[in-house]
Image (cartoon, rainbow, N blue to C red):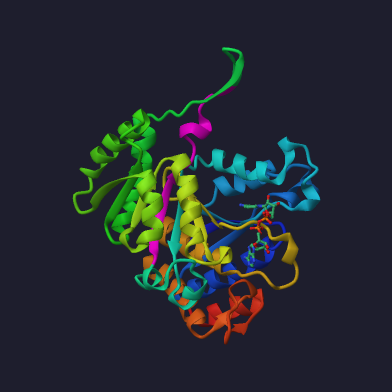
Amino acid sequence: MNKTIAIIRGDGIGPEIVGEALGVLDAVAEKFGHAFTYQEAPMGGCAIDAFGVPLPDSSLKTCLDSDSVLLGAVGGPKWDSQPSANRPERGLLKLRSAMGLYTNVRPARMFQDLAAACPLRADIAKRGIDFVVVRELIGGMYFGEHSTFEAGGERKAVDVCAYTEHEVRRVARVAFDMARKRRRRVTSIDKANVLDTSRLWRSTVEEVAREYPDVELLHMYVDNAAMQIVRDPSQFDVIVTENLFGDILSDEASQITGSIGMIPSSSMGEGSRGLYEPIHGSAPDIAGQNRANPIGTILAAAMMLRYSFDMAEEAGTVEAAVDAALKAGLRCGDIMNEGGTLLGCREMGAEIRARI
Ligand code: NAD
């Protein structure tokens, strides 16, 4: 297969970790006979320096013309004094909206070899953590009307939470499609005992579920879900939920797996094109020192293979190579433990490539 991938290296550790992910993609292309063409798309602080704006039109076009987008991270103290309309993060928001990305997907997977970094009790961690949070990204309370006004002699604030059926339906389909590529179980999380938006959410998800008779659907209230994620995360396969609940639960989910440097994420819209990135930022404190952990970005590239290019075997090969490197005791600084072998970003990338 031939695929064109827009590459946003970004700022801070971005260029270092993206470089290692591209090395892994090259190894996959060679092993499986694919051709990946990389098109550079400067975005973030580096684009402000070179073009005066965080997302130049040429970069946006490169992303929109590509089969998928791989991003390192953007931002850093150098650009903190930029006016808010021209900050590096604005580039990312503009890109998400131009690509119509309405779903964020974040896996919560614990590597057994890093179980010591899991903050849960050993007997819970032992059962394994391997689920995905599918979060609606551009609706709900974050995008409703916000107002603060005087009422009855005091200030009052209102944030409107609204969802339409089609907004729920399209994210539910992403979750069910994803479950078909996993263990075929969707847990839809809402607060249907209190909220109208949640009742609409639940009934719409049930409608969509009828199109997927091979996938099991369960419902859970968000307060219970927050408990279940720490009590027994092994019960989850795919979680689907609205924007606000997803924001909170996906952070909880990534925390229980260990290091921030290990976790990938993707944002999807219509069609197969997505934006793939690690969940962490540009880590300016360790930038340029060969100390960054590239695994989150390498696993983001694996997600791209699985979900945008339908290359499940290739994705599995990358994930297995990461597992094997960890099993061999290889560690970056953020996941270093007693008895491990400390590697830099480049060396970790090379070790994973060698295991493809
Ligand atoms: P951060 O995630 O960059 O760093 C937090 C801590 O985690 C730091 O100590 C860092 O060294 C460490 N860390 C992060 N990734 C690591 C990795 N791969 N390997 C080893 N250690 C790692 O968060 P921050 O310091 O709050 O933000 C720094 C900059 O990144 C800010 O400008 C912020 O706006 C930006 N940011 C960008 C994105 C994005 O591009 N999507 C996301 C979050 C933050």
> In this view of the protein, which residue sits in the foreground, 129 or 101?
129
Q: Is residue 66 magenta?
A: no
Q: Is residue 143 magenta?
A: yes
Left or right relative to 248: residue 72? right
Q: Residue furthest top?
A: 152
Q: Which percent across, then down, holds residue 303? A: 46, 61
Q: Is residue 333 above or below residue 339?
A: above
Q: Is residue 62 above or below residue 331?
A: above
Q: Is residue 20 above or below residue 184?
A: below
Q: Which percent across, then down, holds residue 144? A: 50, 28
> In this view of the protein, which residue sits in the foreground, 127 or 301?
127
Q: Which percent across, then down, holds residue 197? A: 37, 31
Q: Which residues are magenta?
A: 129-147
Judge whether residue 77 can be spotted in this image: yes
Q: Residue furthest front?
A: 153
Rendered residue at 26%/49% (across/down):
218
Rendered residue at 62%/45% (across/down):
92
Q: Which percent across, then down, holds residue 342? A: 63, 82
Left or right relative to 323: residue 179? left
Judge whether residue 310 can be spotted in this image: no
Rendered residue at 79%/41% (across/down):
82
> In this view of the protein, which residue sits in the foreground, 4 or 167?
167
